[in-house]
Amino acid sequence: MSLPALKRVLLKLSGEVLMGGQQFGIDPEFVAELAKEVKAAKETGLEICLVIGGGNIFRGMAGAAKGMDRAQADYMGMLATVMNALAMQNALEQLGVQTRVQSAIEMDKVCEPVIRRRAERHLEKGRVVIFAAGVGAPYFTTDSGAALRAAEMKCDALLKGTSVDGVYDSDPKQNPDATRFDTVTYDRVLADNLKVMDASAVALCRDNRIPIVVFSIREKGNLARVLAGEGVQTIVQDS
């Protein structure tokens, strides 16, 4: 089972990926390498949206677990995603890729508000659009934000670049015998609580028939291989 022809995609990156080899924060050298991969993908003719998590700076649920008010902690996490988006914008524009950041929390001194039709015009003009601040409300993860933006922008696929090379039947970091799926259905992901994205994000992709492609972004050149239908990946879609 393979993907349909892709014209517009949303690439979701976990914030932790931007740390590179560091314990926290943003590694400019690794962000520059990621930007090269995004540029190479764009040069194939794709229209690209990006959503980046904030876990390398602050994770709302972790803050709530330590006694912070959950809504307050989530807003802090959203602000972290804006910092990551600006870092990626800088790296892309240093490579000559025109990029716009749109934030669900308005901060007009540093980025645009999320306006769907404006984002569509940016994509049509060959710009990369980075959506920041999740959905602009607490209690929703950046996975949900990515699924929402992918649906809004009518993306042909949601590519999730993580630290693992696909979806497994159990945690491969804890179980060396875990089996990786080449393809798996949305319903199986939800029923078995497979750790792809949170349930609301998976359900939103299912309802809008947006395939989810899970792959390792840490492996150099992997984004291009996945877009070419090669490389190690798991595709989540209807059977």
Image (cartoon, rainbow, N blue to C red):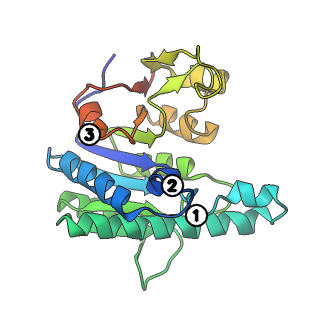
Q: Earlier in the sequence, mark 1 or mark 3?
A: 1
User: Which element carries disc 1, helix, strand or loop?
Assistant: loop
User: Is residue 154 visible to the viewer in this orientation of the structure?
Assistant: no
Q: Are marks 1 and 2 in contact (CB under 8 Å)?
A: yes
Name the residue that disc number 2 marks: 15
Taking the spot 53% from the left edge, 15% from the top edge, the residue there is: 179
Q: Residues within 10 Å of mark 3 (few under 14, many from 20)?
A: some
User: Mark 2 is on which residue type?
Assistant: Gly
User: Mark 1 is on which residue type?
Assistant: Ile
Q: Nearer the viewer, residue 3 or 119?
A: 3
For the N terminus, the image quarter is: top left
Q: Residue furthest right?
A: 67
Q: Residue furthest bottom?
A: 109
Judge whether 34 appears above or below 209 on screen. Answer: below
| Residue at mark 1 to residue at mark 3: CA–CA distance | 26 Å
Q: Could you tell me residue 180's position as x and y percent?
A: 49, 18
Q: Residues within 10 Å of mark 1 (few under 14, many from 20)?
A: many
Mark sitting on residue 233:
none
Name the residue that disc number 3 marks: 221
Taking the spot 63% from the left edge, 36% from the top edge, the residue there is: 199
User: Which element carries disc 3, helix, strand or loop?
Assistant: loop
Q: Could you tell me residue 25's position as x and y percent?
A: 52, 64
User: Is residue 178 visible to the viewer in this orientation of the structure?
Assistant: yes
For the C terminus, the image quarter is: top left
Taking the spot 37% from the left edge, 64% from the top edge, the residue there is: 28
Name the residue that disc number 1 marks: 57
